[in-house]
Amino acid sequence: MEHRKLVEQLAGKLGRSKADVNKLVEALAVVVKARCSEQDSVVIPSFGTFEPHKHTEQVQRDPETGQRVLMPPTLVVDFTVSNVLKNKLKLKEQS
């Protein structure tokens, strides 16, 4: 789903303007980014968990040149779906 469609559907469900909902979605993204950059998990009840993992630096080989390159450490965010949402999706899939 595109960002625009998400904002439209949320605005319809919440009875608020698209501009207000867009600000809310953007604020959520900013908070998740900030907390994950501090290596703190973000849990949204009945939805899921955003959990950051730090990957250490690695030596990798460039496939084109064959040269060994040191890759810096990276921060990767994993998303785990909550059991509540997972069960709802399974029920909808079965019907």
Image: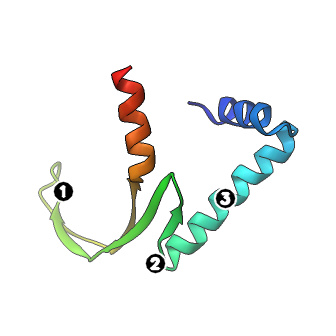
Q: Quadrant of the N terminus?
A: top right
Residue 39: mark: 2
Q: Horizontal and vertical percent for residue 22?
A: 77, 45
- Figure label count: 3
SS at badge 2 = loop
User: Residue 57's quadrant in the figure?
Assistant: bottom left
The image quarter containing residue 7 is top right
Evaluate if marks 1 and 2 touch, with contact meaning CB atoms under 8 Å apart: no
Q: Which mark is residue 62?
A: 1
- The correct choice, above or below, for 37 with respect to 28 in the image is below
**Where's residue 89, x and y in %?**
41, 35
**Under tag 3, what secondary structure?**
helix
Identify the residue shown where x is 17% and y is 48%.
64
Which corner quadrant holds the C terminus?
top left
Tell me which label, 1 or 3, sits earlier in the chain: 3
Residue 65 appears at what percent x and percent y?
16, 53
Question: Which amino acid, by three-letter code, is at mark 3?
Answer: Leu
| Front position in the image: 46 or 28 | 46
- Mark 1 or 2 closer to N-term? 2
Q: Are marks 2 and 3 in contact (CB under 8 Å)?
A: no
Tell me the tag on residue 28: 3
| Residue at image point 74% right, 31% down | 8
